[in-house]
Image: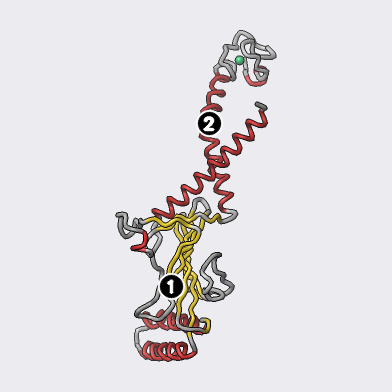
Amino acid sequence: MKRWLLKLALFLLLLGGGAIVNVAVAWAFAAYAPIPLDIGIVTHTEGLRWPARLPNDFPTRPTHVVSEHGRGFERSELAAFRRSFQERTIGSEILNQEQAVWESRDEPELREPMLQDIAHRRSVLESSEDGNYSDYRAICISAGWPLLSCVGVRWLADRGPPPNIPRASGVVGAAEIAWNPLTYRTSTPVTMNAFENRLLPFIPIWPGFAINTGFYAVVLWLLFAAPFVLRRRLRVKRGLCPKCAYDLRGSAGAEACPECGNAMVKREVVA
Ligand SMILES: [Zn+2]
């Protein structure tokens, strides 16, 4: 086989191996990292977009996002609500009452965060789409190291008001496993604990996926090549042919190794 063909095959093999290690590392983080089930502080953000392939009845765009980062993972929850004019009016009145109560309280360290929270809930209420009471969420789990390389989504649709919420949920771009290191370690049917089950995401995040794959391909190459490079160096140091280990100390100045014909001898071996 031609030499360049062998090199190409090795390159593709390393790249494939790098991609496999990349996904394996991402899944290890997705399975074991301390990813919180729920995160409270809502940040209202403009210009948000839903991930692809959610049910058709999701509102046009998410109104706010909540994010939590850690080593090897990110959890961000996008959400949007629908409220009728009447529901918006009632909700607004409830917020007015809560605000009046907190404004009259004499505990500034409690009052300020509560007022901020009320202001945020008001902006979410005001930015909700028109329609019957319903809440929509997309929880995006990204994982990978050194960069985030894969993402998967759990979507939740509460198509009605409490207390009897008609809830639907699903997973896009991820495999769900009946496992969560933070809550329990037994295997239960996947459908029993949809919130707590971990997702193994498999939608690539570019360029993180490519960079991680290259990174692990280099690591694999080092693991493969290091022993041969080391052997070669030791042979040169001992005055042996780097290719076949023939003793060259008696053939100083030779153009090639008399045993195997390796032409690199003169340049590499210092006799
Ligand atoms: Zn030789």
Quadrant position of residue 135 = bottom left
Quadrant placement of the C terminus: top right
Residue nearest the observer in this picture, 200 or 226: 200
Q: Residues within 10 Å of mark 2 (few under 14, many from 20)?
A: few
Marks 1 and 2, the one that precedes in the sequence:
1
Q: Is residue 36 left or right of residue 254?
A: left
Residue nearest the observer in this picture, 120 or 27: 27
The numbered disc on residue 218 is none
Q: Is residue 253 left or right of residue 166?
A: right
- The residue indicated by pointer 2 is 226
- The residue indicated by pointer 1 is 41
Give the quadrant of ligand 1. Answer: top right
Q: Residue at x 53, y 56 (%)?
A: 203
Q: Residue at x 54, y 35 (%)?
A: 222
Q: Secondary structure at mark 2?
A: helix
Could you say where residue 40 lies in the image, as x and y percent from the top left? 41, 72
Q: Residue at x 46, y 48 (%)?
A: 25
**Residue 236 higher or lower than 65, as above or below:** above
